[in-house]
Amino acid sequence: MLKPSYIRVIIDRSIHRELDYLVPETLVERIDVGSRVRVPFREKSALATVVALLPESNAQGIRPIEAVLGDKPILSKPLLELARWMSDYYCCPIETVMRSLLPQVIRRAEVGWKKQLFVRRAREITFVDVEKLRKRAPKQAELLEALARLTEPVAAADFLRQHSLDNQTLRAVVKHGFAVMEEQAVQRDPHGDEKFIATENLVLNEEQTAALRMVQDALAAPNESKPILLHGVTGSGKTEIYLQAIKLALAQKRNAIVLVPEISLTPQTVERFKSRFAEVQDDVAVLHSHLSEGERHDEWHKIHSGRARIVIGARSAVFAPLENLGLIVVDEEHETSYKQEEAPRYHARDVAVLRGKIEKCVVLLGTATPSLESYFNATRGKYQLATLTKRVDENQMPLIRIVDLRQERRKEKAAAILAGKLRDAIADRLEKREQTILFLNRRGFSTSLLCSNCGESRDCPNCSVALTFHRGAARLSCHLCGHTAAVPKKCPDCGEDALIYSGFGTEKVEANVTQIFPQAVVRRMDADSMTRKDAYRETLRNFRAGKIDILVGTQMIAKGLHFPNVTLVGIINADLALHLPDFRAGERTFQLLTQVSGRAGRGETAGEVFVQTYTPFSPSIQFARHHDFAGYFQQELEFRERCDFPPFKHAVLITVRSAHEARSKFSAGTLARRLKEALPNEFILGDPTPAPLEKLQGQFRFHILIRGEAIMRLSRLIREVLDKLPFPEDVAVAVDVDPYQLL
Ligand code: ADP
Ligand code: ZN
């Protein structure tokens, strides 16, 4: 008789603890680490993931599991190891980590394969059979003829459509025993109706060859390879290197994951990858947030079953259940959208690096503007560095001109949205039939509505920000919580007819540009104008086709788009990102200016960029203007070191929030005192302070910022303090390790 065995599981509930169960003998064979099981929990059943097989257990009142789900573990051992690491590093319960690792549709196991009716011939069909029906039921005769020619089962719907026949006819034929209908599982392929033409490897230039060789060497020695940081200016051919690197991995019979920021997971990007690997198109799986549950289910299983060999996706694709991983590419590694802003608050680039270490695969981080952290790692020898200094087409880097808005203001009294020089440049492009992009990272028409009599502004009742006026929708709206309100005619506070609209967003830029250049075709691309499903694709298509002269937009247009005919880029206000209370403000501004500038002059003609700013001499702007990454890195690094900020120290931001201001403040104070007792001196503990965005969605927020080098230890100490401290029911505490959102 087999010895009864035990398992340890993590159930899909927040109980902060692992539980042991007994495995009935009949199920022993089917279970392994990573299997999904159904177990009794309290009075009900719960789903759980197996994390260990045990020869024995000394847990009290142990109960047997109810069922094993699926025929193969859902989670590989390396992924489980990754989950443990994330739990420790990000100071986050493992069951919360699991929620990110396994898509909901997989965890709940409710959505299955899509079933479709197929039709096949049930017996030989003769000439006589057909003729017998010809008079009485000509449709059926027609169907029989088609059926006779069938060599394999086909989807009933397709079959009927092809022959312009209806369901009723098919049912009659089935009834007469000529055909049978069967359900078959089919795969939902979000890109199924597209055909791709295979593209060949391009001949690499010298710099590209050196970079690819680095990947090749790393693939050859997976045990000792360090992550590779590929720093290449915009248009230097990084994507071509990703494509060829993947080919190398595939040739070794290993698989690859490509992470791209959600925002640049455009049809254009996906197409580039699918085309290169057109012979193996089915092997490419795509994961992004717009998939339906069914599509997500199918893509996930395609990966899990080993059919997909390349996965392209946004942040969470770093958890794609690919086995035998050879390469993880992280494109635009500096992008903050790789950071998840809810628990587990992980950074996909950092998780990729760790997964690479666990699975002994090569990690390739690419960007035109490396994050300070990554570049610092490269200078310290933790990463290898490959550099591409030239654009592939040998085009000049765009010429960046700074427009000092202070001077403009002196010249034109009322500040215009577009300075005179930028207006002239646009007029010039219109004449030459070249295209312009205008960038402003703020939606809406006016950013606030003030009363010139009493001075009150229309603020969000839930958040400490002003409501934005949207002219198209004719409403005021809060960009943080979505609250909307009618636009008052008179000041609701003092009753005077003295409301003034101030500040501007993309909607007003569009209106302004249309007014100045009535002959131009102007389109806007932001979250407000792109609500229709295909609007994004359509606008880009029209822009590419030259049907749009001027494209106005938010960050939606800042990245990864290639338009050879764009020769002018205007950055309407470079100061927006610069003055946020965030130690990364300078870094973000530098990145943004460099990235947006990269949209200009990708064709034959050199590009020109106008940067409008009130602080023309700020280092981020000056270094970006001279395309001087090294200079910018050096000065930014000095600042970070002086202030004990990353990459010299890790930061942990704790947010305490509650609908009651006093309770939030009190809890933050208590927590800070406990932390002070628990943390040794090597950690720098800040005082609890109201968050810069003090009120958000009706919650009052307090921050505690801690910095230190030994992040694993710091995480553990914080966890211990939090576990012992009872917070009132209506107070929530969030721990953010390596935070990117300091508001
Ligand atoms: P990046 O990703 O660095 O912005 P891309 O990989 O998109 O740059 O390359 C820019 C353009 O140059 C693309 O149209 C690409 O097809 C082309 N390209 C890249 N490498 C080469 C090469 N070695 N020879 C010719 N064209 C290339
Ligand atoms: Zn709000």
Image (cartoon, grey):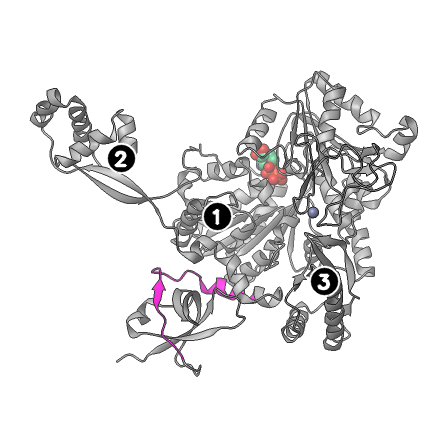
Quadrant observed for ligand 1 in the rendered image? top right
Identify the mark at residue 311; answer none if there is no mark. Answer: 1
Which one is nearer the viewer's eye here, 466 or 97? 466
Tell me: 117 left or right of 435. Answer: left
- Residue 270's spot in the image, x, y percent? 51, 39
Give yes or no for contact between labels 2 and 3 (Cβ–Cβ under 8 Å).
Answer: no
Q: Residues within 10 Å of mark 1 (few under 14, many from 20)?
A: many
Quick one: SS at disc 3? strand
Q: Residue at x 82, y 56 (%)?
A: 638
Q: Nearer the viewer, mark 2 or mark 3?
A: 2
The image shows residue 658, relative to residue 172, as above or below, that is below
Amino acid type at mark 1: Val
Residue that badge 3 annotates: 651
**Which picture quadrant has residue 528?**
top right
Tell me: 65 left or right of 600. Answer: left
Question: Is ligand 2 less than 8 Å from the beta carbon at label 3?
Answer: no
Q: Residues within 10 Å of mark 2 (few under 14, many from 20)?
A: some
Amino acid type at mark 3: Ala
Highlighted range, magenta: 62-85
Which one is nearer the viewer's eye here, 721 or 597? 721
